[in-house]
Image: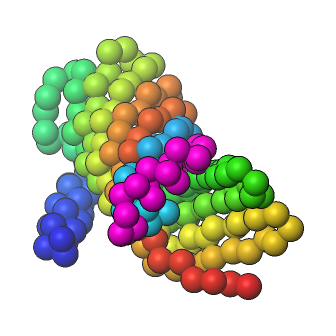
Amino acid sequence: MKRFLITTMLFCLVLLSAAQEQGIDSKRFYLKAGISGIGPNFYGLNDAPDDNFRKEVLKNTKINAYNFEVGSLFGIDMIDLGDQYQVGIDVNYLTVNYVSLSQSYDNEPDEDHSFFEIGSAIGPVFTYAPTKSFELDVFFKLNPTWISGDVISYGDQPMGYLGFKGMKYKMGLNARFDFLMLSAEFNPGYTVLQDWD
């Protein structure tokens, strides 16, 4: 896994360096918002010794996940794929992932979680532009997490966890209108949280 991460990061840095040599016309700033898929091991459910426990938790759980990003696309002009296609690097200066998780059980108070993850991301992107004003991107990015947390509401006993370490991944599809984007992505990975009573 470490070898894969190092190789991917070096590949991204080489492409980013090549993109910067192409000039400012190849750099495009954007704001992005969208929905996320959170991965099969979110909330550590895959670590449960009993698979039935995982199924029972998910059956009683409602999950919504969203993302917001500020970044730039660096086009690699030396890779010429024609007027409608381009390869580049997607750099996120800021990524914010938010997940709301609500668990409901009979004869017990509801347990509500508000997860947040703040980080950055970098990775390759492939762009298809059917028109000059509308573009579609397919991307894969490494998403290190710098700050993460979980605010829990259980009856009258709020509590929380905070962390400063994590590594996630982003893969998905963007629909881009000028500097605004909408996205649907899959965002698996892990964060390390500690009690902060």
Does residue 171 show up? yes
Q: Quadrant of residue 113?
A: bottom right
Does residue 143 show up? no
Residue 60 inside the magenta-drawn segment: yes
Segment colored magenta: 47-70
**Residue at 55% across, 63% down:** 117
Residue at the top extreme, as displayed:
131
Q: Is residue 67 above or below residue 189?
A: above
Q: Nearer the viewer, residue 79 or 42?
A: 42
Q: Nearer the viewer, residue 79 or 63?
A: 63
**Residue at 32% across, 54% down:** 141
Q: Is residue 180 above or below residue 75?
A: above
Q: Is residue 26 above or below residue 15?
A: above
**Residue at 32% across, 15% down:** 130
Spot occupied by residue 10 in the image (x, y as percentages of width and height): 18, 67
Residue at the front extreme, as displayed:
107
Q: Is residue 14 above or below residue 106?
A: below
